Amino acid sequence: MLTNRQLLILQVIIDEFIQTAQPIGSRAISKKEQITFSPATIRNEMADLEEMGFIEKTHSSSGRVPSEKGYRFYVDHLLLPFHLSAKDQREITSVFEQDLVEFEQVVQKSVRVLSDLTNYTSIILGPEVYATTLKQLQIVHLSPSTAIAILVTNTGHVEHRSFSIPAQIKASDLEKLVNILNEKLVGIPIVELHDRLQKELSLIINQYVNDVEIAFSYLKGALFDQQPTNVYIGGITNMMLQPEFSDVTKVHSLYSIIEKEDLMAKVLRSNQQGIQISIGQENKVHEMQDCSLITATYSLAGEQVGTIALLGPKRMEYSRVISLLNLLSNQMSDTFHQW
Amino acid sequence: MLTNRQLLILQVIIDEFIQTAQPIGSRAISKKEQITFSPATIRNEMADLEEMGFIEKTHSSSGRVPSEKGYRFYVDHLLLPFHLSAKDQREITSVFEQDLVEFEQVVQKSVRVLSDLTNYTSIILGPEVYATTLKQLQIVHLSPSTAIAILVTNTGHVEHRSFSIPAQIKASDLEKLVNILNEKLVGIPIVELHDRLQKELSLIINQYVNDVEIAFSYLKGALFDQQPTNVYIGGITNMMLQPEFSDVTKVHSLYSIIEKEDLMAKVLRSNQQGIQISIGQENKVHEMQDCSLITATYSLAGEQVGTIALLGPKRMEYSRVISLLNLLSNQMSDTFHQW
DNA sequence: GTTAGCACTCTTACCTATCGAGTGCTAATT
DNA sequence: AATTAGCACTCGATAGGTAAGAGTGCTAAC
């Protein structure tokens, strides 16, 4: 329903606006190489595009600016396959060149590189702890009444919780318990850990009739009570470089949202596989409705486990960002697959 | 050298400016309860105070604003002993009411409470890892060629590093090494760990002439290469609520500094015991020269180990903040002492 | 169907006048 | 001699007014 000429003009407007953040006028468009017709013609086409809701005026005699519908159309139909610059490729792959064996290290580097390359804010959601398997469980006593439980996963993730040991439990009981659990539970996915613990418990109780039960319930509390969020954020300050965030109150309201890790986790987690794009009002969270959010997923051992996201103004460099995210997510998946 | 009347006026000006962030005129001062003389008199005194450098005008016919010298004098000579509101006290002590056995938990709560109470940015520097002692050393193998070293301190701090195991080292060697090290090194302060490792090594080598040496050097690298920063920050967005930071570029430059944890650690670490106050230009870091930084120290087992700080505009509520920091630092020291 | 021409709109920058808060100085008061 | 009332003056903030420039929509010509 859009003519080729309209498509072309829409594309030029959006491309241009992404770079300059300024309204685009008919004269400016006519000067573009690809454009062979006059400003007057362009004005007519623009009036149509505006009527259809793809572009807007900031005031009655201004140039045009893409609407959210315009961006959506652009993203859905006008994105050219983008090939990353050598530098972009180099930066991304360099993350994986040193042999980083710990998940955290990879993610922290990635978050950094992404935000540096794009000048947007990057957010990476760590793997669901529950999608990984138990490598080792360990108890370290700090004092007669306190201890730390340390849990290592096959991804190299180390999780620790401290808890106080109730008086009636002997240290030896606790140790016995941990030994048994280690024997039985190593290799079990963390998701199933809770259930399996429950199951094993009944067997154990028959053999050691001490206060193991209480020790167990404490241990369980320590390990499962608070679920860690593992949200990694990079380049938060970058948003302030964007002209659409020259107003402190805007920045403030956005930042107070980003700070809420659990909310961010929720927003990002709910995405299906592949690249997802939310533009402006499409974002559920009100404070993010001046932004666009692009997410990709990465997987570990075949299962989808985490999300990489870039948050920027609606006027994002969509094609470049998508290519970057694709490259990174593939590299991450590959790397984790090797482990 | 300052008359009582001048002291009084200076105090009123600063107290008022701290609350309103607006220049104070002679008329406004004369309306204060404590003030018994006329605006004209006050103007004369203000002219003197300005000549001496304690206050400034924002333009030739404006009210007066405290200068940095003024704040310094205020802090050094005019601070009244401040008694915290019931709410302030309650909030601070509530942090310590649940039995939190892990250092991180206490600090994270504290950072939160401090920034919420003050609307400034709070920064807490964790204990020097090196001031604590080793509780347990642990190696967990992830794959034949990678492993994680986990180090638990007596403060309940868990530190982990991953490293790759060079081909020529057998897993059994590494385990042997760790067992030996655990026997020999538990209870040793982390500061001395490096030296002691070196010493023990020579003995070990005599007994196990395998490739233990290489394993050791790898382990050493894993444990000592990157020193963790452990800087905890709360309420970064609070700075945007202060009228002196209504300009995005200011906020941006400040934030990019705060983000640099190692720099922050350096800035905070270099303080001697007790409350320290740096006002504006007194701060070494250029980007912080519109701010005041108030730091307090807390101790663990008698030794000074960490710093609590509040960063705000020069126009801070000095007396309240000092009282809050004092209370918190004492509470922290007490709590950690019990462990 | 396309484009040149033109009147019209709106933003921006700049100038001007006015108002009010606050000062410094002088002279009168205590 | 110290304090204060009075007053001229300064400067920032606000509002109105004008001119320039960018861009549009429409009409008429190509």
Image: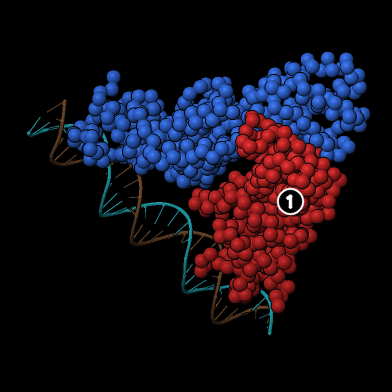
Chain colours: A blue, B red, C brown, D cyan
Give the tally of numbered discs: 1
Residue A53 appears in the rendering: no
Q: Callout 1: residue from which chain?
A: B
Which percent across, then down, holds residue B307? 72, 53
Nearest the viewer among B130 and B74 is B130
| Left or right of B254 in this view: B77 | right
At 74% from the left edge and 56% from the top edge, which residue is drawn? B296
At 81% from the left edge and 26% from the top edge, which residue is drawn? A179
Tell me which corner region of the image, top left, top right, bottom left or bottom right, holds residue A154.
top right
* Amino acid type of the residue that numbered disc 1 sits on in the rendered structure: Gln
Nearest the viewer among B216 and B97 is B216
| Left or right of A124 in this view: A62 | left
Bin the neighbour count of mark 1 within 10 Å (Cα to Cα): few under 14, some 14-19, many 20 and up: few
Q: Is residue A58 above or below residue A71?
A: below
Which percent across, then down, holds residue B143? 64, 30
Q: Secondary structure at mark 1?
A: helix
Which residue is labeled 1 in the image?
B198
Which percent across, then down, holds residue B55? 61, 68
At 78% from the left edge and 48% from the top edge, which residue is drawn? B203
Tell me which corner region of the image, top left, top right, bottom left or bottom right, holds residue B212.
top right
Residue B214 appears in the rendering: yes
Which percent across, then down, holds residue A293? 48, 31
Tell me which corner region of the image, top left, top right, bottom left or bottom right, holds residue A102.
top right
- Quadrant of the rendering where the N terminus of chain B is positioned: bottom right
Q: Is residue B169 above or below residue B34?
A: above
Nearest the viewer among B70 and A70 is A70
At 61% from the left edge and 72% from the top edge, which residue is drawn? B53
- Quadrant of the rendering where the C terminus of chain B is positioned: top right
